[in-house]
Image: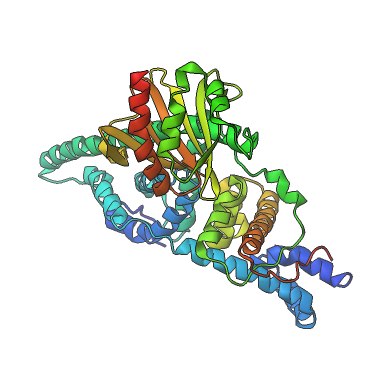
Amino acid sequence: MFSRPLTRVDDFEAAALPHLAALYRTAKFLAFVPAEAEDLVQEVYLEAWKSFHRFEPGTNCRAWLFRILFHRLHHYRRRQLKLSKVESFADPAAADALPAAQAVPQDLRDEDILQALARLPHDFREVVLLADVQEFSYKEVAETLSIPLGTVMSRLSRGRKLLRQQLAEVARSYGIRVGDEGGPL
Amino acid sequence: MKDLNFDSKPCEWVREQLDAYLSSELLVETTAAMLKHLEGCAACSAELESRLRLRDALRRAVNQQLPPANLGEAIDRQLRQDRPALFWSSGPRHWMLALAGLALVVVAGSAAKQALGLRRGRQLVAKILTLGVSDHVYCAIRTHNYLRAGRPADQLQARLGPEYAPLLPVAEQELPGFEILEAHICTVPGSPRKYVHFIALGHGTILSVILTRRQGEALPGEARLVAETVDGMRLYKSHLSGMDVAGFETNNYFGFVISDLGQNEVLHIAAALAPALRNQLDAG
């Protein structure tokens, strides 16, 4: 087993740069101001590089980078929320009152999906992005966000449900038939 | 990981566990039991198909967002300026490396200072633009503080008071395609700050034009933060709390145009309004 810490920038870049696009996309949908995503990602790489000697080759570099990203995101979010009196439009608790199942329309544009994603309450959005887009396991999401596994499961379920409801509403506004709305069994 | 007994109420159990199934968090045996159920249940299969379609569409839409082309290069440049390995080297030319290291520290420090300055500038712009967005969200969106039919101009001018009434014809003239439904002085709970607020209806949505007195703050002059310059006025744009906002400053006021029309459209409207409002405010 190779145990000597890697210190060369080329080694770091080979391990870390393939995850640049994934980090940027995630930051873009979670930063308080989307333009900050670029700065955030640069900061993540600088911080990761400074502690790269502690990174164990063979372990999950992507998960490590995402943990740094979310640490920074949460730090900035706390600061921005202090600056701003504007609250989130969507009430996280409201997702509980949603119909059990909204049919997903066949023809939806990417911009509708992205808009619906942007409207998700922040706590749900970060779990949906990590689990459904970045394909992290529940355990990895829980570690990245420092929240219990049960919270990951409930936020993911409610986030998916809310996203589905918003898209069904968009489809109805276009006059697209969304079919049988399902509902509780 | 979850393992479940599907002997009773199979459809209910399957529906309850679809989230875990979708995330590949069920045990192999449980997954097999689910697949067996799905083979014979059209309703649950359709539900699963719906969820898969949504997840795949979301994944596709997000993954189409590409980072700026130069981001990788910028990171590479920063990393090589901030290269700890250099200081760990040893050899006969150690002092030269130390000098080179010192030079790099100076360069990296300067680059970091610039980056920090830009970040602080962006945060300051966001903080100031948030003043306008807060009022728009509270007054126009949440409390819906306007009449759908609008009020006559004389009533609106009376609500603005003599100091700000002359702004009404300016706003009307510079907002073609919009009907001004409301004009008043308002506040946001928890803050003593007052806002001159015009609420207009047009292009299928609501738009706010908001002015508030500067209280010692100023928008940063850094060129990279300015979206557009019109008639000597710097315009800034952002997307905050789901709203597109453009902002500007006059001698004594901050001005904001806020809607969900898209950042460029809002900026375009602000570019027409800002000089006219400034001229009226300065004349008053």
Residue most extreme to the right: B8
Report the quarter where the C terminus of chain A lies.
bottom right
Report the quarter where the N terminus of chain A lies.
bottom left
Residue A150 x/y as whole percent? 70, 51
Image position of A106 (left or right of B221): right
Image position of B224 (left or right of B94): right
Residue B282 x/y as whole percent? 33, 20
In this rendering, the count of numbered labels is 0
Q: Is residue A135 shown to the viewer in this render?
A: no
* Residue B57 quadrant: bottom right
Judge by depth and name the residue closer to the eye, B155 or A47.
B155
Q: Is residue B170 above or below residue B23?
A: above
Question: Which residue is depicted at the point 82% across and 63% down?
Answer: A184
Residue B94 x/y as whole percent? 13, 42
Q: Is residue B108 shown to the viewer in this render?
A: yes
Image position of A88 (left or right of A178): left
Residue B153 x/y as whole percent? 53, 30
Question: Which residue is depicted at the point 47% across and 37% down?
Answer: A76
Residue most extreme to the bottom: B40
Judge by depth and name the residue closer to the eye, A95 or B156.
B156
* Residue B99 quadrant: top left
The structure's colour scheme is rainbow
Q: Is residue A119 above or below residue B209?
A: below
Judge by depth and name the residue closer to the eye, B132 or A160.
B132
Judge by depth and name the residue closer to the eye, B102 or B250.
B250
Question: Which residue is depicted at the point 65% across and 33% down?
Answer: B143
